[in-house]
Image: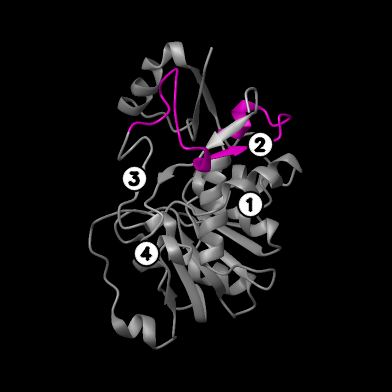
Amino acid sequence: KLGDHVVVDLIITCGHCYQCTHGRENVCETVLVRGSGTDGGWREYFTAPESDVYRIDPKIRWEDAALIEPLAIGEHCTNRGRVTAEDTVFILGTGTIGTIIAQACKVKGAKVICCDINDESLERSKRFGVDYTINSNKEEIVARVQEITNGHGCTVAFDSACFPGSLTSLFKVGIVCNAGRIVPMGFCDKPETISQADINKRELEVIGSRMSAYQFIPIAKNMAEGKYRLEGLATTFIKFSEIEKVFNNMIHPDPAVKKTVIMFD
């Protein structure tokens, strides 16, 4: 109703294809993504079907509500990876998505190891509850993982670094245990060097994950209940009237800018 605080789903789907009728609407045959495949929210007025609009607790700040969508990605991919409290999770890359995946894992009770080449990013991940960090420029990843896991390896690994070869690196023996799951998060189109033997000798699972499905409502509920550490997830807040600053940051990337939220005046 008029005056409700709401968030709008990222995706537009057909509702009747195989994927939509089997809980996989995020990969609908005709899926459109707001802000990518069709117009998004960088405008003063916006319309969407009621079914794509979710009411949220008015005590959630708007700058936090903008994080519901990326937090939904974290929840979706950790569900795809079947993360539980029994798991030890390895996350390659500690940008915003890597940090959000870590939080989703911690909410599920898992132990989390984050790996990056940037000490500042690794320290930031600790503030969000990560149990162990590895700087791969200073430490040997396999040796450190084996030390942390008492020689067992991790049960689940997420590639949120998403550079050419990053997925292949997770197949090094000793990072993921036999029967483990590997979830790539990116859209890098460069070939990886993974053989059938790399997968089948240890009966590993490679599980795709794209955006999210049916996660906005539970994420908004968790946010209202204070289950996430939100401070510092978004690092940059820009007024809509100063939107040119967003494009300037794209052209001239600043490592300190992890996630930008556009605020309407």
Q: Is-magenta flag for residue 42?
A: yes
Residue carrying label 1: 103
Q: How many marks?
A: 4
User: Measuring 49% from the left and 55% from the top, which residue is drawn there?
Assistant: 138
Residue carrying label 4: 167
User: Measuring 23% from the left and 63% from the top, which residue is drawn there?
Assistant: 191
N-terminal of the pair, mark 3 or mark 2, is 3
Identify the element where label 1 is drawn. Answer: helix
Its colouring scheme is one colour
* Mark 3 or 4: the one toward you: 3
N-terminal of the pair, mark 4 or mark 2, is 2
**Separation of marks 2 and 1 at Cα, in angstroms:** 20 Å
Query: On screen, 57 above or below 187?
Result: above
The magenta region covers 39-66
Residue carrying label 3: 32
**Separation of marks 3 and 2 at Cα, in angstroms:** 23 Å
Residue carrying label 2: 56
